[in-house]
C-alpha cells in the first residue's frame, strides 16, 4: 500500500488520492502575474515518488478568491469554496 506524509500523520493512498484530486481540481478563475500581499493561509507540500516536491501555496485575495502559487510561481486564482473544500478534507484526515 502506498503512503504519504502530512505533517506527522501518515495518509493511506485513498485519502491522499482524494486530497490530491481536490488540489489539482481547483477551478481557474483568472491568470495571475504576481502573488497578492499577505501571509499564505495554506501551504501544501506533495512529495512525488521520485523524491521531488511540489509546493502549492494558497493566499487569500478577497472573500471569494485565492491566489494559487506552485513551486513559488504565481499561477492563477481559484474559488474560496475550492480552498475550503481542501481545508475540510485536511481536517478530516
Image (spheres, rainbow, N blue to C red):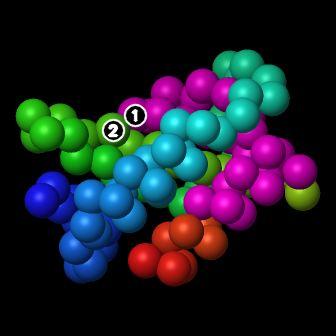
Task: Provide the residue designation for mark 1.
Answer: 71
Mark 1 surroundings: few (<14), some (14-19) or many (≥20) residues within 10 A: few
**Residue at figure coordinates x 23%, y 46% from the top left:** 47
C-beta proximity under 8 Å, tags 2 and 1:
yes
Q: Is residue 7 above or below residue 69?
A: below
Q: Nearer the viewer, residue 82 or 17?
A: 17
The total of numbered circles placed on residues is 2
Q: Is residue 47 left or right of residue 19?
A: left
Coordinates of residue 54 in the picture (x, y in percent): 33, 38
Q: Nearer the viewer, residue 35 or 24?
A: 24
Secondary structure found at label 2:
strand
Is label 2 or label 1 in front?
2
Is residue 52 shown to the viewer in this render? yes
**Residue at figure coordinates x 74%, y 39% from the top left:** 78
**Residue at figure coordinates x 80%, y 29% from the top left:** 29
Of the image marks 2 and 1, the number of the one nearer the N terminus: 2
Magenta segment boundaries in residue numbering: 64-86
Task: Provide the residue designation for mark 2.
Answer: 54
Mark 2 surroundings: few (<14), some (14-19) or many (≥20) residues within 10 A: some
Coordinates of residue 23 in the picture (x, y in percent): 53, 45
Residue 69, quarter of picture: top right
Coordinates of residue 21 in the picture (x, y in percent): 50, 44
Residue 51, quarter of picture: top left
Q: Is residue 22 above or below residue 4?
A: above
Amino acid at each position: 500500500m502506498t503512503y504519504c506524509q502530512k505533517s506527522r500523520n501518515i495518509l493511506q493512498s485513498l485519502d491522499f488520492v482524494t486530497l490530491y484530486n481536490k488540489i489539482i481540481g481547483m477551478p481557474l478563475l483568472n491568470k495571475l502575474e504576481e502573488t497578492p500581499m499577505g501571509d499564505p493561509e495554506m501551504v501544501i507540500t506533495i512529495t512525488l515518488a521520485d523524491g521531488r516536491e511540489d509546493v502549492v501555496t494558497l493566499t487569500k485575495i478577497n472573500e471569494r478568491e485565492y491566489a494559487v502559487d506552485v513551486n513559488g510561481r504565481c499561477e492563477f486564482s481559484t474559488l474560496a469554496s475550492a480552498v475550503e473544500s481542501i481545508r475540510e478534507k485536511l481536517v478530516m484526515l
